[in-house]
Each structure stands twice: as structure tokens, then as C-alpha cells.
Image (tube, grey):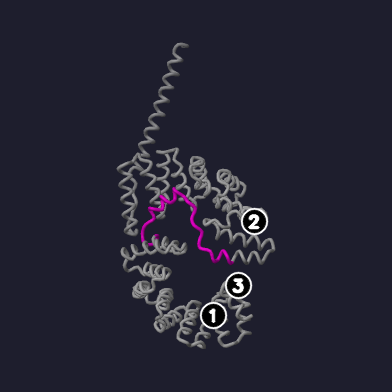
Amino acid sequence: MSAARPRRTLALASLGALLVVILVVLSRARFSRSPSSPEVDTRGFDPAVARLIEQTLREVRAQSKSAAAWGKLGSVLMHYELPDTTSTAFTRAQQLSPDEPRWHYLHGLALMTDEPNRAMKELERAAELAAERTDAPRLRLAQFLAERGRNADAAGHFQQILRTRSDHAPALLGMARICLAEARLRDGTNWLAQCLEEPHTRKAARALLATLEQQLGNMEAADRAARLSARLPADEPWPDLYWTEAQKYRVGRKIWLEDAAVLLDQNETGAAEKLLREVTTRYQEDEDSWYLLGWALNRQGRAPEAEAVLREHLRRSGQSAKGHAQLAVALLAQKKITEAVAVLETGAALKPTWREFPSNLGYAWLQLSQPDEAEKHYRQALALDPGFLPTYTALAELSLRRHDEREARRLLQQANLLDPDDPQVRALRKRVE
């Protein structure tokens, strides 16, 4: 009996090992059958999006064991509201390349809105794998933690970034935001002092400084910081290699128009124009692309081209108030004043609450040597938007023409409250004095 027991134990152990092998093989076979031939219904998608998805699916089917192919599929799908297939693709890429941080990072970004807890875990794993190779995963993790009120954990990651690079502007800004959330106002201003002039943070930093100064009771400093923040262009995005590569797969009319609008906000008018030229070629009947292209050309001072493009926009959308506003800008730049007045009056009828129309009508009537008519429209613009400084200076200038220094002084006092550092306000104040 004692001699038989080891053989039975060995037999059971062998059977157990065999079962484990069978289960592993079946599991692998089941997984490979499912994700090696994923299906996505692209009916109803923008044609450019459908082509990209179908091409990427073909690549995955041809290279079903390639982490790069699966990662690309996830990077494509994450932009088009396909969360389940996106998650499947990134999970498969992670399994095929377990030490690669980018798939965990992009997977985390894709999960942020709908599954924040899973997103947090993916970002934590990405930050761990990336280590010092790239700061993007740890930076985004820190920002995400701060957004969810986990200030101590966020500060730990921001400080880890700063130990590697002490002038890391987004990490400095992140620390300042945490100080504000914890009412450590002086500490917050100290962190901000180091990133106020950095192109990646200066606008946001000035806006945050305005809030901090206001809570400290320094109202003049708060107003000054807020005015400067409002005048600054949008902050430049912080370099993020993984996200930049994934953004290549953002295609289609809607996304290209969003990207063009961002470029215009960043004053990248040349890049915006190039993108919008392609959109107007691909989607010739799309009214918004013609409008944005006209806006880009106006911003570059190319008024005749802007006029032609904006007329194309209005041919497709005759009731577009914004189209009339931009067309008037192009006409005024070409000294086509009478035409501009007609366009502005049509636009004002479409949007009587927009300050832009009476403001530009005031300018146009001045060019036609009709100061009374100009003042009437400027007064209307002021009533619609009492916070628009150029209206005060235009009315102050008209008052000085009529030798009404008392009214000019009153208007300039109001303008001075909005921005005492404005060059035109200063020049007019000197004339009054």
C-alpha cells in the first residue's frame, strides 16, 4: 500500500498539470479567435474616418500578434466613441508588449470620462513603466489626481517630476493649484512665480495668480493679472510624444475643424489655413470650413482672399451672422466702406445683441465722415457690452473732436478701470490733461 501512494500522487499531479495546460491553451485560443478578427460597423461614419478604421482593422488581421498593430487600432478607435473595442485593442497591445508604457497611457486617457478608476490604474502603470523616459504619463496622472481632489497623491507626483527638472512649468502650476485648493495662498504665489513667463503656462498661471491675489485681498494686483491673462494667447501644449502620435489618427471634417479652431486660438494662422484648404476641398459644401478659412485669411491681413472665401460661406449659409461679421472686416480692410455698412446692417438684423455689429458700424460711419451716426452706433455697442474697452476710447476720441473734454474724461475714467495700461487710454488721457 505504501508503495502505491507515490504513484497515485504523481498521477494526480500529472493530470492537474495537463488540465492547466489545456485551460491555458483554450484561453489563448478563445482570446485569439475573438480579438484577431475584430469587427467595427463604420456605416454612418465620416468617409475619412471609415477608411482609416477599415485600413487599421486589415493591419490587425494581418499581424494579429503585433503589439504595435493592436496599439494603433486602439489609438485610432479612441477618437470615435468606440470604448469597448478601444479597450480590447489596448488590452491586447499591453499583453503582447507588457513593458511598453504608451499603451497603458493611451488606454488611461481613453477611459478617463467613463471609467475614471480604471483610467487611474492605467496611468499609474504607465508612469511606473515610463520612469524617467518621458514625463507625460506621470504629469497626466498628477493632474488627474488633483482634478479628483487627491491633492497629497498629486503633489507627490508633481514633486517627483520637479526633482528631475526643477523648472518644469506644468508641475509648478499643478503645485500652485493644489495650494489654492488647500488655502495655502502664499505658497501658491511662490510656485506661480516660477512659471508666469513660460509659454506653456503663462496664461493659465496669470489667471490663477489673479484668483490668489484676490483671495489675499490684493485687488489691484488681481485685476492686473486678470487683464494680462486675458490679453495673452492660449498656452502652448506641453510636449507629449505618445498623445501627439495618437492624434495623427484624428481625422474627418469635425475633428479637422476643431483642430483649425485651436490653431487659430494659438495664432497659428498659416497652419490653420493649410488644414482648412484641405477641408474645403474634401467637403466643398461645408459652410463652417469656409467661414474659418475666411477668418484665418482676415487674421493674416489677406482681405481680398478673405472676402472671396466668406462670400462662398454666405452662399451656403445666407443667414450666418458670424459670416456677415467677418465679411465686413474684410471689406473695411479694403476701404469698401459702403459695402461694409450694408453687410453690417444685415448682420445686425440677424443678431441684434452682438456688440460687433454696432461697433464696426460706428467705425464705418466715421470713415464716411458721419460722426453723429458713428456715435449713435458706438453708444449702442456700449450698451450691449459695457466691458469692451475700444468702445470707450472711440467715444472719447469723438468727444475730443467736439471739444467736449468733460465727456471724454468721464469715458476715459471708465476705460482706465478696465485697463489703465492700455496705450490708447494713456495717450487720450494725456490729451485731456
Q: Secondary structure at mark 3?
A: helix
Decide: few, some or many residues near mark 1? Use Cα within 10 Å; few <14, some 14-19, many ≥20: some
| Residue 118 at least partly seen | no
What range of the chain is rendered magenta? 227-255
Measured as percent of width and height from the top left, residue 245 is found at: 41, 50
Residue depicted at x 36% and y 59% = 252
Q: What's the CA distance linking mark 3 and mark 1?
A: 15 Å
Query: Which residue does the numbered mark 2 point to in the structure image?
Result: 189
Nearest the viewer among 47 and 8 is 47
Q: Secondary structure at mark 2?
A: helix
Q: What's the CA distance linking mark 2 and mark 3?
A: 24 Å
Give the mark, 2 or 3, whose residue is nearer the N terminus. Answer: 2
Amino acid type for the residue under numbered disc 1: Ala
Q: Which mark is residue 418?
A: 3
Give the mark, 3 or 1, whose residue is nearer the N terminus. Answer: 1
Measured as percent of width and height from the top left, residue 201 is found at: 54, 56
Q: Is residue 84 above or below residue 290?
A: above
Asked whether, in this view, residue 232 is left or right of residue 73, the answer is: right
Q: Which mark is residue 149?
A: none
Q: In which image quadrant can residue 103 be found?
A: top left
Task: Tell us which disc is closer to us: 3 or 1.
Answer: 1
Labels 3 and 1 touching (C-beta < 8 A): no
Q: Secondary structure at mark 1?
A: helix
Decide: few, some or many residues near mark 2? Use Cα within 10 Å; few <14, some 14-19, many ≥20: many
Q: Is residue 239 magenta?
A: yes
| Residue 71 at least partly seen | yes
Q: Which mark is residue 394?
A: 1
Measured as percent of width and height from the top left, residue 305 is found at: 35, 72
Residue depicted at x 49% and y 51% = 112
